[in-house]
Amino acid sequence: MNRPLRGLALVIAAATLWGRPSLAADDPGSDVPIATDLTAVIALQGLPCGKVVSAREQGDNDYAVTCQDGTGYRVFVNPDGRVVVEKQANE
């Protein structure tokens, strides 16, 4: 993926996370479920996931995510406004 396209995709993903008040992994009232958005954010970071099967909001713009392969991630927006994806240790 070329650099401008990747940058645009990250901006869209950040705006999506920042602007979403929904706590549910799949909000039936929305056009695009948060799980789909989080799957895209993780993929843009180049991390393995497949697709997000569950997401739990831990705070504003801060999600605990479980992927179909069992991998866990924390997806959040840091104080600088950047989307960060951290792999979580299996418990």
Image (cartoon, helix red, strand yellow):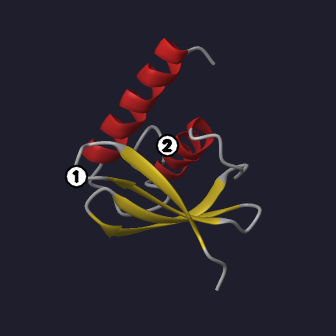
Q: Position of residue 78 (x, y in %)?
A: 29, 52
Tag of residue 14: none
Q: Position of residue 81 (x, y in %)?
A: 26, 43
Quick one: label 2, few (<14), some, or many (20+) residues within 10 Å? some
Callout 1: helix, strand or loop?
A: loop
**Amino acid on which the number 2 mark rests in the picture:** Asp
Residue that sits furthest to the bottom in the current view? 91
- In depth, the one of 90 and 13 nearer the eye is 90
Residue 73 vs residue 59: left or right?
A: right
Residue 10 sits above or below residue 71 on the image: above
Give the residue at mark 2: 37
Residue found 63% across the figure and 19% down from its top? 1
Q: Is residue 87 left or right of residue 80?
A: right
> Disc 2 to disc 1, how far (Cα)?
20 Å
For marks 2 and 1, give the one nearer the viewer.
Answer: 1
For numbered disc 2, what is the local secondary structure?
helix
Instruction: Spot the residue most to the right.
Output: 69
**Which numbered disc covers residue 79?**
1
Instruction: Identify the residue shown where x is 39% and y is 29%.
Output: 12
